[in-house]
Image (tube, grey):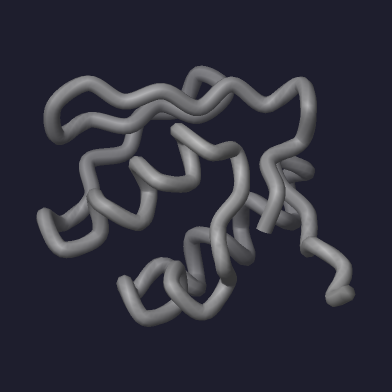
Amino acid sequence: MILHPKTQMLYLGARFFINGEVLVPRPAQRPALAALADRRRAAGGALARAGLARLILEWHRCGFLSLEPKT
């Protein structure tokens, strides 16, 4: 997954912010979301294992991120 170039994703403590929306994920989900915010990309499998598949699908539908083509 790759964040859209115009997507803003930040976090502070337990709160994550993406394009003006606030999310307070479970503690086990925070490392995967922090990696996505820091690197602007993350493996879909890692996000799914963290229990974020539904959220990532919603963000994809909103245009916040896109699928990374396999090489």
Left or right for 50, reference 1: left
Say if 49 sits above or below 62 in the image: below
Front-most of 38 and 62? Answer: 38
Say if 42 sits above or below 63 in the image: below
Left or right for 27, reference 48: left
Residue 2 at what x, y percent from top left? Answer: 70, 49
When asked about the image quadrant of residue 12, the answer is top left
Q: Where does the C terminus fall, quadrant-wise? A: bottom right
When asked about the image quadrant of residue 16, the answer is top left
Say if 5 sits above or below 3 in the image: above
Left or right for 27, reference 20: left
At 87% across and 68% down in the image, what residue appears? 69
Residue 44 at what x, y percent from top left? Answer: 58, 71
Going by the picture, which residue comes out furthest to the front? 71
Left or right for 3, reference 10: right
At 31% across and 25% down in the image, what residue appears? 11
Residue 53 at what x, y percent from top left? Answer: 49, 73
At 44% across and 73% down in the image, what residue appears? 46
Q: Where does the N terminus fall, quadrant-wise? A: bottom right
Say if 22 sits above or below 32 in the image: above
At 75% across and 55% down in the image, what residue appears? 61
Q: Report the label total.
A: 0
Residue 22 at what x, y percent from top left? Answer: 36, 29
Front-most of 40 and 24? Answer: 40
